[in-house]
Image (cartoon, rainbow, N blue to C red):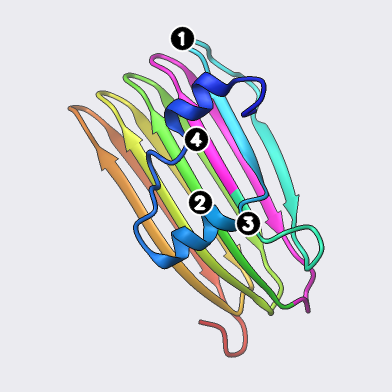
Amino acid sequence: AAKEFPDIVQKYFGTVVPIENKFQALHYSVLNSGTFLYIPHDVEVEIPLRSSFFIDEVTGNSMHTLIVVEPGASVTYIEDLFSPTTANIVYTDATEILVKESAKLKLISLQNWGLGVQNFASRRAILDKNASLDWYFSEVGCKYEKLNYDVVLKGEGEFSKNFWVFFRMQNQH
């Protein structure tokens, strides 16, 4: 995406989740994969878009999601993240979301981590006037998680519905 759409990526990348702590600094220093979703002005995507990521000791340890929904646009995006059940992995991720005026985003994030994953995550959304975000998040597994989560409402009439479920096993934190 950075090669095909450099102007758009450079305009937004790192603006919603800047480096504010050591975990975000780690994320940006080892970043090696991710998703860039850009929905142009007044485009309504009628079928859900989906991506899947598998992490292990070989495939990498840092993913970045950048979603920009321009004014009047709408989309549903589903992301699946999973790992082996026994791998010991330090993983960092950041999700940056910009939902512009009168735009709509439905985000479904499904994470199925192995018992050895240590996840350090930052997820932040900025909603402009009359924008809406429905964020559904489910996480199963994980040895340890440090999560920073924010939704910023910038104008009038924004709406954010958030439903987050975490399932832990054994001595997980």
Single out the mark in the foreground, 4 or 2.
Answer: 2
Give the side of residue 61 with respect to residue 16, left or right. Answer: right
Q: CA distance from mark 4 to mark 1?
A: 16 Å
In the image, the segment drawn in magenta is: 64-87
Label 4 with label 1: CB-CB less than 8 Å? no
Label 1 with label 2: CB-CB less than 8 Å? no
Residue 20 falls in image quadrant: bottom left
Query: Would you name the residue on which mark 1 appears?
Result: 42
Amino acid at pointer 3: Ser
Q: CA distance from mark 4 to mark 2?
A: 17 Å
Tell me which numbered mark, 3 or 1, is placed earlier along the sequence: 1
Q: Residue at x 36, y 23 (%)?
A: 100
Tell me which numbered mark, 1 or 2, is placed earlier along the sequence: 1
Farthest-out residue, bottom: 171
Numbered circle sitting on residue 106: 4
The answer to whether 13 is drawn above or below residue 168 in the figure is above
Does the magenta portion include 65? yes
Query: Would you name the residue on which mark 3 appears?
Result: 62
Farthest-out residue, left: 156
Tell me which numbered mark, 4 or 2, is placed earlier along the sequence: 2
Farthest-out residue, front: 29
Amino acid at pointer 1: Asp
Tell me which numbered mark, 4 or 3, is placed earlier along the sequence: 3
Single out the mark in the foreground, 1 or 2.
Answer: 2
Q: Residue 56: percent from the left, percent from the top?
A: 78, 65
SS for callout 3: strand
Label 4 Cα neighbours within 10 Å, binned few <14 / some 14-19 / many ≥20:
some
Does the magenta portion include 22? no
